[in-house]
Image: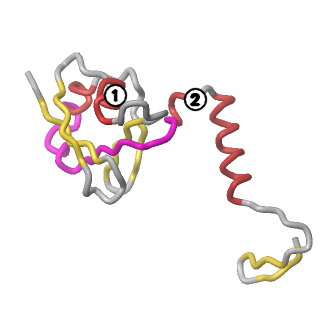
Amino acid sequence: MLMILTVFLSNNEQILTEVPITPETTCRDVVEFCKEPGEGSCHLAEVWRGNERPIPFDHMMYEHLQKWGPRREEVKFFLRHEDSPTENSEQGGRQTQEQRTQRNVINVPGEKRTENGDSYLG
């Protein structure tokens, strides 16, 4: 049997591709089908009712799609152009979270910042 999976290649849902799915198709197969030649790390994410979940590379996609049953039409799949959080080791995952935190907080001595409406010197 063959299913067709629509994968959005960007957040705006305007660029997409249709991927043929057989019982042997893994998530890794879908990612390789969708990404550009030579493109670095990517992963497949499913979004349902505003919740996003990365799909592990070894996941069997045909079985996964069947489990959604009639709600399959409500689920959207996106190719994310970054490493999958599920493919990182536990330590790597923590490092990634720390890096995100560090990226979001810029500490500049003497710079006046506003946080929760209160001004203070950093």
Label ID, residue 32 = 1
x and y, in percent, of residue 26 in the image: 30, 22
Frontmost residue, 37 versus 35: 37
Number of labels in the image equals 2
Q: Is residue 57 left or right of residue 114?
A: left
Q: Is residue 41 left or right of residue 50?
A: right
Quadrant where the image shows the N terminus: top left
Q: Residue at x 30, y 35 (%)?
A: 34
Of the two numbered discs 2 and 1 in the rendering, the one whose residue sits closer to the viewer? 1
Q: The residue under label 2 is which amino acid type?
A: Asn
Q: Tag 2's secondary structure?
A: loop
Q: The residue under label 1 is which amino acid type?
A: Glu
Q: Residue at x 22, y 33 (%)?
A: 65
Question: How far apart in space, not on screen, are marks 2 and 1 (Cα)?
Answer: 18 Å
Is 1 located above or below residue 96 in the figure?
A: above
x and y, in percent, of residue 40 in the image: 48, 33
Q: Is residue 52 left or right of residue 12?
A: right
Q: Badges 2 and 1: C-beta atoms under 8 Å apart?
A: no
Q: Earlier in the sequence, mark 2 or mark 1?
A: 1
Q: Is residue 89 left or right of residue 24?
A: right
Q: Residue at x 61, y 26 (%)?
A: 89
Mark 2 = which residue?
Answer: 88
x and y, in percent, of residue 57 in the image: 40, 25
Frontmost residue, 115 versus 122: 122
**Which span is picked out in magenta?**
66-84
Q: Tag 1's secondary structure?
A: helix
x and y, in percent, of residue 64 in the image: 26, 29
Residue closest to the far left: 1
